[in-house]
Amino acid sequence: MPAPLPSRITVLAGGVGGARFLSAVRAWARIHSPSTRITAVANTGDDMWHVGLRITPDLDSIMYALAGVNDTVRGWGRVGESERVSAELREWGAGWPWFTLGDLDLGAHIARSAWLREGVPLSSIVPRLTSRWDLGVELLPATDDEVETWVRIDDPESGAARTVHFQEWWTRYRAKVVTHGFERRGLAGSSPAAGVLDAIENADVVLLAPSNPVVSIGTILDIPGIHAALQATPAPVVGVSPIIGGAVVRGMADACLDVIGVPTSAAAVARLLGARGGAVDAVADTAHPVHEAGARGVLDAWLVDEVDADAVAGLEAEGIRSAAVPLWLRDEPTGVQLVSDALALAAG
C-alpha cells in the first residue's frame, strides 16, 4: 500500500535556489495533493539596513518567484524593473554604488521599513507583503530578530583585517578576497519567528532545499530552538544536495564551504548537516553552533544527483538514508519529479 500523501510540508530555504525548489513543491502539490499545506521557513541572515531601509533578500526572492514577478534573466529582483532611484542615490553618494535596488523592489523595502519602525514584527509584515499574490505557500522568516551575517576578510587594497556585511563580501567582492570566517551578529539573543517551531514540529515532512548550506540553511539551523526542533520533530527530515558533481548548482556556496573547511561535494555537505541522532564533526568556523564538536545532526535522508551515486553507500553506512536521482530543476516536470523522489525517500 502506498504511503499517504503528506498534509503538511515544511521547507527550509534561502535565496534563488530555495525559491526554485519551493516552486517545484507547490507544483507537486497542485498536481498530486491540492490540500497539502506548504510552509517555507526562509533565511534572514542576509538581511541588512541600507540607506535607512531594511532589505530582506531571501524573503523577497522567494516572494517574487512564487508570485511570478521575478526577473529570471538577472536572477534577482522584479521583472520590468527600472533603477532611477538607485542612480540618484549614486549621484548623491548615498549607499553603496555596487548595490542596486530596483524601483519596484524599493516599494517593498519602504513598506517593510515603515512597519518595522511602527513596531510590527517581520513575521507579521511578510503576510502583508505577500497578500497581494496567491503564492500557494505560507512564507515565514526564520526569526523576527536582526541576525546578520558578517564576514572577516583582508581588505583587498590595504591588506588590513576588517569585517564586512555578507552582502559586501558576496556582491562587491564576489567572495574572491582572503576570508577568515563568518559572524552571526545578534544570533545568541534571537529566537524563531512566530509559527516556525509549529511548522517544524507538526509537519509530515521537513525538506531542506538545495540552498547554500552555510549561510542559508546553516543560518536557519543556528537560530536557537530550530536545530532542537528539527531533532525532535516526528517528521522525516530530507535534504536535497546543492552540489552536483563537485560543483555548486548556482551561487557561491563553494566559497562559503571553503571558508569553513568543508569540501565542495554532495557527501561532505550531508556530513556537515549530519545524521539525526549522530554526532557531527567540528568544522573550521566555530561561529556555527550547530557544527561544534559533539553537536547532533538533523538529517534522516539526503538526495544526491545521479553523478554522485557513489556517495550513497557511504552515507547510508553513516546513518543517512540516501538516493541518487536527477537534481537539475530544468522545468516544472523535472521539479515535480524531484519533489516526488524526496517524498518517496521520506516515506521509505
Image (tube, grey):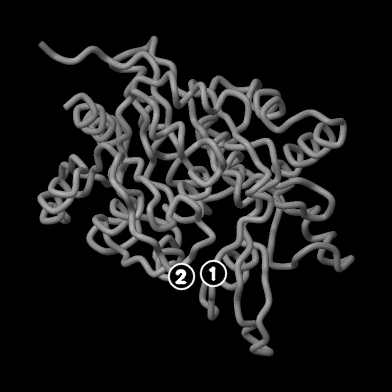
62 sits left or right of 160 in the view? left
Type of amino acid at the residue the image marks with label 1: Gly
The residue most toward the front is 294
Report which quarter residue 79 is drawn in. top right
| In front of the other: 246 or 189 | 189
Q: Residue sitting at 36 percent across and 45 percent down?
A: 296
Left or right, 236 with respect to 144, comes to left
What residue is pinned by disc 1?
181
Which residue is under mark 2? Answer: 259
Determine the residue located farthest toward the bottom in the rendered image. 158
Q: Quadrant of the N terminus?
A: top left
Do the numbered discs 2 and 1 sit on residues whose CB atoms are within 8 Å?
A: yes
Q: Looking at the picture, which amino acid does disc 2 mark?
A: Val
Secondary element at tag 1:
strand
- Give the quadrant of residue 29: top left
Residue in the foreground of this view, choosing between 269 and 284: 284
**Horizontal side of residue 266 vs 255, given as left or right:** left
SS for tag 2?
Answer: helix
- Placement of 24 over or under 54, stated as above or below: above
